[in-house]
């Protein structure tokens, strides 16, 4: 006997739900998802009425209470505050719900860290991820400066800085230690500029022992690059997008964040150039090779969602169609490399691949540095060791008969 299909309860249509439906439709959501969001909005309004509250009183605390009551009632889906994201955004846009309070650092070090965050963003032009990493690295140093009277930075001396580094860094790996010292130098410069310390203490931060040019940059061979690009299924929209991303990484040596930040207005099709948004908020224009431009144009014409948000080139193909994150760019590289049978491949390896391929083609180190947008020639010098043919010309023969 066939079971009767359960009839879906019709959501009451209100002015709020109609506006929400229109916004979700523009973002590319399916009808089923829009229906669930309308129902969740109606549940929220009913809960507020039961609590004798207005929308203007809906804070993060009340949102957590609402979701807690849903879980207690046995609701199995849409039971976390994240599910209310689009609804809250819609209601805030109408001015019915207050904006969330900006997160502030807690504890005695909170005020100075909030000022330092603003400094890094406005003066240094660092990304939010980099700012968070700097602040996290500074917490142990600031914790050591907290006394009964609060945070003491005015009496900070060079000896205090050196003592912290000597005690803290030896037990950390090289990467963590280097980032901690970089963040510490930046923070000490900020303290001096802000007048907290009378003397500049950044020079007191020692350096982590690091032998420059000790490593050897590794890139993919030409056959491996062909296999990587061939692993993209260009019969699907995802494959067309991924091929364009990989071509940019391999041919122009872009960083994953630079691919994620690439905007539609950054490409000058007539001039054949592309503007790259690099580190430190630097904008530099590079030539756009024909094969790279062709793969990007193919994606824009046939694969990029028509309801994509914003002006970023590469977006999610699942609603909401927002710009890809740098981590998603890395995931695309890793997943494609696995399909190609290349094992574990990081996005930065393709940057090395672009540099080594240029070197094989006869490009000079200065030309490679211009493509990779290195600030210092020493950074590019590591690729000199890849040119084994020319290195053999200057290498001294091994004395076979040495006594």
Image: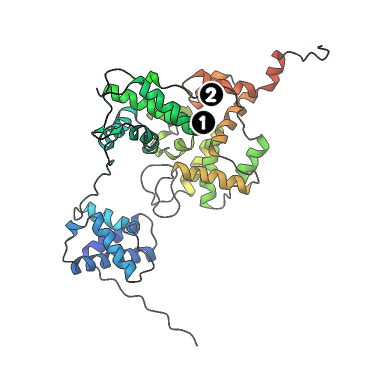
Q: In the rendered structure, which disc, 2 or 1, sits on the residue that comes first in sequence? A: 1
Element type where label 2 sits in the image: loop
Asked if one can make out residue 53 in the rendered structure from this viewpoint, the answer is yes
Residue 362 image position (x, y, % from top left): 63, 21
Q: Relative to the observer, which residue lies in front, 377 or 204?
A: 204
Query: Quick check: 202 above or below 174?
Result: above
Determine contact: label 2, label 1, CB under 8 Å.
yes
Residue 226 image position (x, y, % from top left): 64, 40
Element type where label 1 sits in the image: helix
Q: Residue furthest right?
A: 401
Residue at screen point 36% across, 54% down: 27
Q: Few, some or many C-alpha atoms within 10 Å of disc 1 (few <14, some 14-19, many ≥20)?
A: some
Q: Few, some or many C-alpha atoms within 10 Å of disc 2 (few <14, some 14-19, many ≥20)?
A: few
Q: Residue furthest front?
A: 148
Asked if one can make out residue 278 in the rendered structure from this viewpoint, the answer is no
Residue at screen point 34% across, 66% down: 36
Query: Quick check: 90 above or below 259?
Result: below
Residue 347 image position (x, y, % from top left): 54, 38
- Per the rendering, the mark at residue 210 is 2
Q: Can you identify the residue that label 1 sits on?
A: 174
Q: Relative to the observer, which residue lies in front, 304 or 9?
A: 9
Q: Relative to the observer, which residue lies in front, 294 or 123?
A: 123
In the drawing, does residue 170 fall left or right of residue 136? right
């Amino acid at each position: 006997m066939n079971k009767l299909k359960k009839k879906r309860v019709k959501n009451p249509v209100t002015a709020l739900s109609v506006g929400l439906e229109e916004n979700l439709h523009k973002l590319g959501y399916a009808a089923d998802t829009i229906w669930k969001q309308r129902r969740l909005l109606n549940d929220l309004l009913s809960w507020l009425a039961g609590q004798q509250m207005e929308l203007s009183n809906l804070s993060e605390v009340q949102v957590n209470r609402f979701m807690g009551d849903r879980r207690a009632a046995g609701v199995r889906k849409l039971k976390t505050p994240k599910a209310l994201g689009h609804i809250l955004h819609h209601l805030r846009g109408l001015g019915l719900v207050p904006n969330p309070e900006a997160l502030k650092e807690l504890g005695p070090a909170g005020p100075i860290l909030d000022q330092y965050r603003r400094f890094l963003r406005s003066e240094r032009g660092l990304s939010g991820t980099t700012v968070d990493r700097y602040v996290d690295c500074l917490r142990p140093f600031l914790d050591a400066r907290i006394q009964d009277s609060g945070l003491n930075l005015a009496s900070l001396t060079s000896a205090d800085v050196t003592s912290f580094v000597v005690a803290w860094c030896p037990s950390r790996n090289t990467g963590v230690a280097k980032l901690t010292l970089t963040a510490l130098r930046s923070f000490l410069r900020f303290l001096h500029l802000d007048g907290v310390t009378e003397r500049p203490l950044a020079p007191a931060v020692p350096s982590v022992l690091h032998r420059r040019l000790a490593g050897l940059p590794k890139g993919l061979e030409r056959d491996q690059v062909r296999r990587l690009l061939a692993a993209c299924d260009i019969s699907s929209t995802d494959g067309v997008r991924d091929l364009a991303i990989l071509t940019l990484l391999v041919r122009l040596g872009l960083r994953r964040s630079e691919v994620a930040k690439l905007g539609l207005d950054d490409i000058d099709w007539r001039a054949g150039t592309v503007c790259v948004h690099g580190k430190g908020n630097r904008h530099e224009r590079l030539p756009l090779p024909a094969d790279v431009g062709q793969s990007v144009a193919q994606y824009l014409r046939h694969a990029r969602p028509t309801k994509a948000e914003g002006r970023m080139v590469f977006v999610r193909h699942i609603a909401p169609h927002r710009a890809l994150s740098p981590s998603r760019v890395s995931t695309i590289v890793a997943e494609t490399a696995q399909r190609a049978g290349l094992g574990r491949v990081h996005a930065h390896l393709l940057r090395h691949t672009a540099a080594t391929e240029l070197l094989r083609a006869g490009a000079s180190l200065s030309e490679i540095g211009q493509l990779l947008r290195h600030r210092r020639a020493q950074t590019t010098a590591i690729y000199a060791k890849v040119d084994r043919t020319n290195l053999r010309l200057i290498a001294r023969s091994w004395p076979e008969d040495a006594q």
